[in-house]
Amino acid sequence: MTGTGDDPCVRNTMPDCDNLEEDTCYVSQPTCCPPNYHCERDPVVGLYCQHGQASCGNAEWCRYFADISKQCKTEICQQDRLVAKMTRYALVFSALAVLTDVIDIVAFCACPDAVVFKSLINLCSSCIKWGAFTLIVGSGAKEFMVQLVEAGCYHSPNDSALVVERASDELLWFILLQVGSAVLSIILAPLSAYYGGKLVGVPYVK
C-alpha cells in the first residue's frame, strides 16, 4: 500500500513488521510503514504507522478504529464491524421493500379487486422498511458516523474525508426516507382495503 494524500492519519504496520511479533520500531527497518508514514509504539495497540503530514483529531479513537493488531479487540473496532454488518442487512431489507412495492403496483394494475392481497403487501412492505430502520438505529450507525467525522481520522480537503462526511449525511437521509416510506405504506394498507375495486366502477347490467 503506497501513501497518498487520502490515507488515514494512522494505520497498521506492513506484513514484514508484524504488530503481533514486533514490539520495537527500528530506524534501520523502513519496511514497517509505507511512504509518508513513520513507525510509532502505543502501550495498548503496539506498533502502528503514523502519517507524517496528517495528524488525527482524536489520536486514541483513530488508533482503535484502525484495528492496528488486526484482531479487532477494541470496542470501537467491534462497533465498526457491527455497523458495517447491519448496514448490509438494512440494504437487503430495503431491496425487499422495493420488490414488495413493485408487486403492489403490478397488483394495482392487474387485479385491482384483490383488496386483501394488496393490503397484506402494503403491511409487509411497511414491516420490512421498519426492519431496515431498526437495524440501522439499533446498531448505532448514525452515532458511530458522527464520532468518525468528529475524530478526524481523515482530513479535508482529502477525498476520503469528504467521503466520510457524505456517508454520514446520506445515512441520515436513508433513515428519514425509510421512516417516511414505512409510514406511507402502513397508511396505504387500509386505503387499499377500503377503495380496492371501487375506482374501477360497477359492471354494466342490461
Image: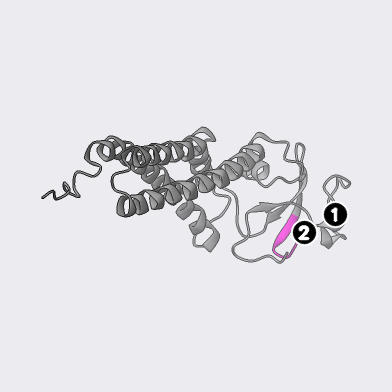
Specify the quadrant that holds the N terminus.
bottom right
Which mark is drawn over residue 33? 2
Mark 2: secondary structure: loop
Q: Position of residue 176 (x, y in %)?
A: 37, 43
Q: Which residues are magenta?
A: 33-38
Residue type of the residue flagged with mark 1: Cys
Q: Is residue 60 visible?
A: no
State which quadrant residue 44 falls in: top right
Residue 69 sits inside the magenta stretch: no
State whether residue 128 is above or below residue 165: above
Mark 1: secondary structure: helix
State whether residue 153 is above or below residue 79: below
Left or right: residue 1 compared with residue 164: right
Q: Position of residue 181 (x, y in %)?
A: 35, 44
Q: Residue at x 85, y 47 (%)?
A: 24
Viewer-closest of 77 and 135 = 135
Q: Kindly report the distance in space between the C-alpha atoms of the residues bearing marks 1 and 2.
A: 8 Å
State whether residue 4 is above or below residue 175: below
Residue that extends furthest to the left in the rendered view of this protein? 206
Pointer 1: residues within 10 angstroms few (<14), some, or many (20+)? Answer: many
Viewer-closest of 1 and 169 = 169
Q: Main secondary structure of the magenta part?
A: loop
Q: Residue at x 30, y 54 (%)?
A: 109
Which mark is drawn over residue 17? 1
Pointer 1 with pointer 2, Cβ within 8 A:
yes
Q: Residue at x 45, y 55 (%)?
A: 166
Viewer-closest of 198 and 71 = 198
